[in-house]
Image (cartoon, grey):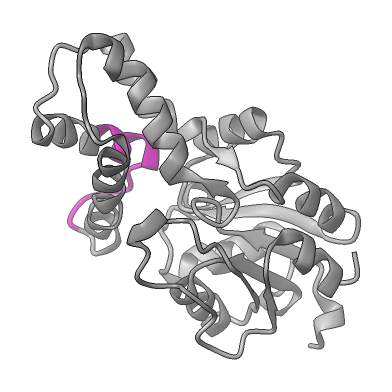
């Protein structure tokens, strides 16, 4: 199918749509600094994020049954607090801190760009985040999704094939009628292998000064854009 046949855009969210690093650092400091803790809060966010892929790998490879991302984040938080020698949080404080991932700021171009893209395409999440996480994140950041798809709907974490196949099927579309939008080369390659069209969006500040990968589009994706405004323009929105 030609690019003109694309009906839906599915979006990676963490890093592509929202600025997880600065937001988690801010939220963690707001909750933990009043309790007397002085930490490098961006390092705290980075170390939490570093546990993300290993936790999902245990689900991907069948070591454990399906577990939604909110719960994986909570398990990782327990280990993270021990690493940073933080203790004494109540159950309510633990939940509020864990839900920092539901209070992530969109990149400055995200809402405007998504709103423009929505005029022409179905726009949906294609994230490893679970439904409640994505819905609350959308409410927090005014993200105008038409649908929340991805890992929980597919019961499979990217980059496993089911994560892409079942999202397209949920929209009653062929994979070739869908375009995956991401700031991560590997995500786009996995989507393309399932028949999706692909759009790379540059997010040079995702990992702050620590960014060592996804510095640019490394493959011949269908669209390469500077941000969502540029993507909307290139897709005729």
- Give how far across and how far down residue 22 sits, in percent: 44, 40
Residue located 52% across and 46% down the image = 19
Q: Could you tell whether 92 is left or right of 129 in the image?
A: left
Residue located 77% across and 52% down the image = 114
- Give how far across and how far down residue 216 sits, in percent: 52, 78
- Inspect this view and state whether residue 193 appears: yes
Magenta segment: does it hold 140? no
| Quadrant where the image shows the N terminus | bottom right
Query: Where is residue 68, by image quadrant?
Result: top left
- Give how far across and how far down residue 206 sits, in percent: 47, 56
Number of numbered discs present? 0
Magenta segment: does it hold 65? yes
Work out whether 196 lies above or below 228: below
Query: Where is residue 62, by image quadrant?
Result: bottom left
The segment highlighted magenta reads 63-74
| Quadrant where the image shows the C terminus | bottom right
Q: Could you tell whether 107 is left or right of 237 in the image?
A: left
- Inspect this view and state whether residue 90 appears: no
- Give how far across and how far down residue 85 sits, in percent: 9, 27
Residue located 24% across and 64% down the image = 61
Q: Residue furthest bottom?
A: 220
- Viewer-closest of 179 and 58: 179
- Viewer-closest of 136 and 30: 30
Work out whether 7 lies above or below 216: above
């Amino acid at each position: 199918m030609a690019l003109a046949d694309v009906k839906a855009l599915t979006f990676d969210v963490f890093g592509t749509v929202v600025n997880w690093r600065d937001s988690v650092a801010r939220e963690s400091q707001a909750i933990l600094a009043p309790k007397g803790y002085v930490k490098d809060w961006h390092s705290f966010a980075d170390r939490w994020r570093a546990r993300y892929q290993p936790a999902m790998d245990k689900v991907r490879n069948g070591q454990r049954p399906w577990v939604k991302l909110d719960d994986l984040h909570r398990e990782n938080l327990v280990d993270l607090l021990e690493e940073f020698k933080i203790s004494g949080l109540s159950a309510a404080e633990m939940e509020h801190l864990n839900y920092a991932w539901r209070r992530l700021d969109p990149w400055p171009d995200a809402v405007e760009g998504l709103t423009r893209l929505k005029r022409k395409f179905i726009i949906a999440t294609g994230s490893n985040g679970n439904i409640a996480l994505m819905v609350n994140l959308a409410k927090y950041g005014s993200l105008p999704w038409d649908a929340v798809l991805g890992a929980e709907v597919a019961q499979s974490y990217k980059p496993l094939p089911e994560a892409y196949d079942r999202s397209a099927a949920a929209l009653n579309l062929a994979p070739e009628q869908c375009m995956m939008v991401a700031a991560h080369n590997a995500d786009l390659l996995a989507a393309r292998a399932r028949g999706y069209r692909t759009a790379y969006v540059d997010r040079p500040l995702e990992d702050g000064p620590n960014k060592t990968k996804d510095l640019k589009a490394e493959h011949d994706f269908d669209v390469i854009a500077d941000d969502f405004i540029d993507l909307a323009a290139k897709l005729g929105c």
